[in-house]
Amino acid sequence: MPKLFIPKTNFTSELKNYIMITIGLALYAIAWNFFMSPFKFLVGGVSGIGAIVQYTSGLPMQYTYFFINIFLILIAIKILGLKFCLKTIYAIFTLTAFLSLFQEIFSEQNALTILGPEKQLEACLVGSIFIGIGIAMCFLNNGSTGGVDIIAAIVNKYKDVSFGRAMLYVDACIITSGFFIIPTADISESLTKVFYGYINLVIVNVSLDYMVNSNRQLVQFFIFSNKYEDIAYYITRSMRRGVTLLDSVGFYSKQPGKVITTLTRANQAHELFNIVQQIDPNAIVSQTKVVDVYGKGFNKIKTKSKKLKSTEELETNHVKL
């Protein structure tokens, strides 16, 4: 069997990913220190735990965020490998540095001092949007802000489950816990903090979904290439997607061939095109959006199971008709 193609790392593409991840992390840190922290808003995830610690003890959020993520990343390296975690490690250190930097910059001039305490709703909305955009920029460039994302990657390694709803529940629990943990003058103030925390949770998720909508879209590819073995090998081994080879015959040339068909997430399309271009620049690639895909590696079929009728019952019903 001939040696199969091993694609080269696209340095320009990787550099662009890291630049966009850095911008997204900077946007997150600015939104937190300018809009969220001055009003003591609650957020979800590991950052939310750090926020509660900051509001109760005065320890800046970035330290709690850093140490919890270091613990999680050590577990992830052991389970998923160092290569998988490189961008997450970069994001953890970079976001910690940005949070410290912008904390100093916005210590005196921030949304609270500029807009006033009566503008906390506006500050919560704008800050939440920017946080959602910042996280989305990380996701769209194959990065992560750590925290529950690390747990999601570990869970998905062993079991094909949708982690989005679980993350939502965890975030809601963290925000709700602020009602019982953070000391306030009266109950109404505690309820207000939780209320704005839920607003943040909704807005961040809406912004995130809007930005990474393509990440949830599914696409189907038909690839016409004489080097189908190399392309199929990469798709199955690196992208971890199933491949089906279809027999084909060129109408004009009358030459037999193979057509690769595969289903992927839309955010994997760029990687696939990059690899096809390296392997066979003359390949023909057809890309089609699909409504949804159900089965292993995609979404689960969620219907109420009904017992199928036996062959005898079907035949009896057919006779009656």
Image: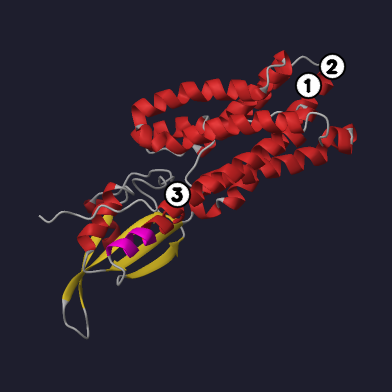
Q: Nearer the viewer, residue 58 or 156?
A: 58
Q: Which mark is residue 14?
A: 3
Q: From the viewer's perspective, is the residue at label 3 or at label 1 nearer?
A: 3
Of the image marks 2 and 3, the number of the one nearer the N terminus: 3
Please name the amino acid that badge 3 sits on. Answer: Glu
Indicate the position of residue 110 as horizontal and vertical percent values: 81, 35
Of the image marks 3 and 1, the number of the one nearer the N terminus: 3
Q: Residue at 75%, 33% (x, y): give it.
A: 105
Q: Secondary structure at mark 3?
A: helix
User: What is the chief secondary structure element of the magenta stretch?
Assistant: helix
Magenta stretch, residue numbers: 273-279
The answer to whether 179 appears left or right of 283 in the picture is right
User: In this figure, which residue is indicated by the disc labeled 2?
Assistant: 186
| Image quarter in which the N terminus is found | bottom left
Q: Judge the density around disc 2: few (<14), some (14-19), many (≥20) Cα neighbours within 10 Å.
A: few
Q: Judge the density around disc 1: few (<14), some (14-19), many (≥20) Cα neighbours within 10 Å.
A: some
2 and 1 marks in contact (CB < 8 Å): yes
User: In this figure, which residue is indicated by the disc labeled 1?
Assistant: 190
